[in-house]
Amino acid sequence: MDANTDSTPKVVLICMPWATTIRPSLALGILSRICAEEDVTVTTLYPNMDMTAAIGFEASARLADERALYGLSEHLFACDIFGAELLSSDEYLDVLLTLKLKSPFQSRDFILELRDRIVGRFLDQTQERVLAEQPTVVGFSSTFNQVMGSLALAKRLKRLRPEVQVILGGACFDGEMGQEYHRVFSDFIDHVFMAEADESFREYLRRHKVGMATTGIPGVTSIQSGRVHLVPGSPLHDMNQSPLPDYDSFFLEKHRMQKETGLVFNVEYLPFESSRGCWWGQKNHCVFCGINTDLMPFREKDIDRVISEMVALTSRYRTVRLTAADWIISRKSRSELFQRLADLDLDIECFYETRADLSKKEFALMRRAGILTIQPGIESFSTELLRLMKKGTRRIHHVQFMRWAREFGIHLSYNIIAGFPGEQVEWYLEMSNFLPKIIHLQPPLHNMHWVEMHRFSPLFERRQEFGVDDYQIREDYGFNFPPDFVDLQKIGYFFSFKASTLAEREAYAPRVREVVSQWIEAHENSKNVPKYFYRLGPSFLRVEDNRTPNGRVMHLANLHQDVFLLCDKVQTITSLKELLTPLHSDSIGSGRLEEIVEELISEDLVYREDGFLLSLPIGFQPRTTEDLYTYVLGDMVKPGSKSGINTSRSIPLLTS
């Protein structure tokens, strides 16, 4: 279908439920800025706020954030498209209500009110708002639980204004999902934008402005001769070409809602991006990770650009909290980024996702930079399971990461997942025996949950290799379409699966969940959080351990102290010998080092995994690896010569 030949195009971008209302849409912010750069009039609407006003903040937030409710959130709008009877909606609700969901979703009356009245009324009001803008193009960006809402409104708009072009994009329209949606809804979809749309959307606008055909744009679907046609596109190569997002409309909508309803929509943080892709995934795609491999190549903005955009966003919108949409922080640039943010000497807070491989010096910089919450890819405390996931790390390195985060007051957002083909029961049981050792470190956000099969993940793409015998779209999503209307395997992002190589869940899940539950509960009471830390004294250190009710105090000095402090970072016997020989040559030569290591392990002061060693208590005050090396080794931070050290320390290991 050709673009409208009107010489003054007008684009309306829409953020439908169930997007969260605590932040604007990064995708729509970027597309809005691209419109401005191409001199195209644009309005961005956030009707997700209107829906929140209709049902309340709590219910809306749960539909937006809880994966268990994703199917329901989509089903409510699917009923507007197809009708509740055709979707066997009442039968679906019968099954849903057996799940004993929390209030208000355990109430059939509440859900029926949503389905039969609130959703329809909301769509009526929203279509009036959109059409009042006199658009020539209406665009929807849809993530996991915005698809059916976007389609429901798109269908209504096209019925009333057939000349308006309807375009869609977002995570759940990528790959064959978007092509299948376009095939079955071609009567009201003009184009679906695959993957990253920075360049394709810009080209679309340029054509639309001059009345050119908008078919054949790389990365954009169109209907030709009754079939979906797609010229392959490519992700944005130069991240510096991606513009600063424009969130003006979000704040205008926020003020509109306060004026109309009296409700205050708090903005918790603003999203931005400093990179796309995943440098780790390029080498090892984690088994469960649903990143499209076409988007995996890591690309990052120049540091100057990142800093200027962060400052510009906080300045324009008067907020000091930002969240990076990056899938992983740059390994090459992160230290410079932390330093540059710290040098600003502003109270800007920032969130990043990261691999659990930061140095302790980077933790110190990160703290100064205001990055106080991070999401590390921890996922498990079993080295065997981490190996199965293709995480490329070990339990001991995760514990090191968590110790340092705790020491510097950095909050971790992570979970433990299970249910991987090839797993073994004993791996989980061994992990459950280990976890009480680190009860003083931050627990996961939630108890252990089962891995999902996501489209684009190795578990999905190479399922036969993992022994997957059968897979189906997540059951609750199956109620969003009439029978035989769509190929569910093509439109699904979330899948359930069966595999002969899965361990028997009941053989390990109750035990692991019991231990994790105790861990989480222990940290919910701020007055009695388990602690295990050490304080430096003159020529000794004091360890205080209240992980258990009885508690204990220990004192370390001389070689015991030095081994313990150097094991703040993962060490081996070989590395300890190299570091400590200049200071304790007699003890090293006599085998005393090995004896002391065994003593520290037996006292649960040091943890050993295979040949790797790590101290378990954390510092009462944060000190970097370089600080501790200097404290132990004097002015030689690295292995080598030694000077100015008192080698006559002889206080033994004491326990009281």
Image: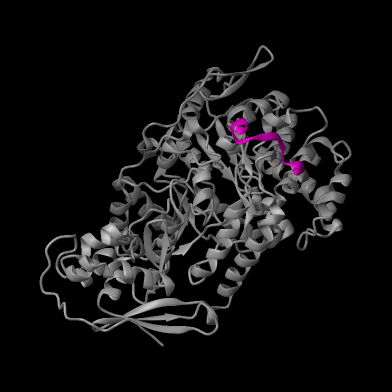
Instruction: Give the x, y percent position of residue 646.
Output: 15, 78
Residue for point 70% across, 27% down: 188
Is residue 473 within the magenta segment? yes
Viewer-closest of 304 and 582: 582
Relative to 131, 336 lies left or right: left
Instruction: Give the x, y percent position of residue 60.
Output: 69, 56
Instruction: Give the x, y percent position of residue 125.
Output: 73, 46
Position above or below: 393 against 213? below
Position above or below: 195 against 534? above
Quadrant (top left, top right, bottom left, bottom right) of the C terminus: bottom left
Is residue 358 within the magenta segment? no
Quarter where residue 215 is shown: top right
Relative to 50, 433 lies left or right: left
Residue for point 36% across, 64% down: 367
Quadrant (top left, top right, bottom left, bottom right) of the N terminus: top right
Relative to 634, 336 lies left or right: right
Residue for point 44% across, 63% down: 402
Viewer-closest of 83 and 527: 527
Residue for point 58% across, 78% down: 525
Magenta residue span: 463-476
Instruction: Give the x, y percent position of residue 106.
Output: 81, 60
Number of numbered discs overlaid on the protein picture: 0
Check the image and name the residue furthest to the bottom.
656
> Could one spot residue 458 in this view of the protein?
yes
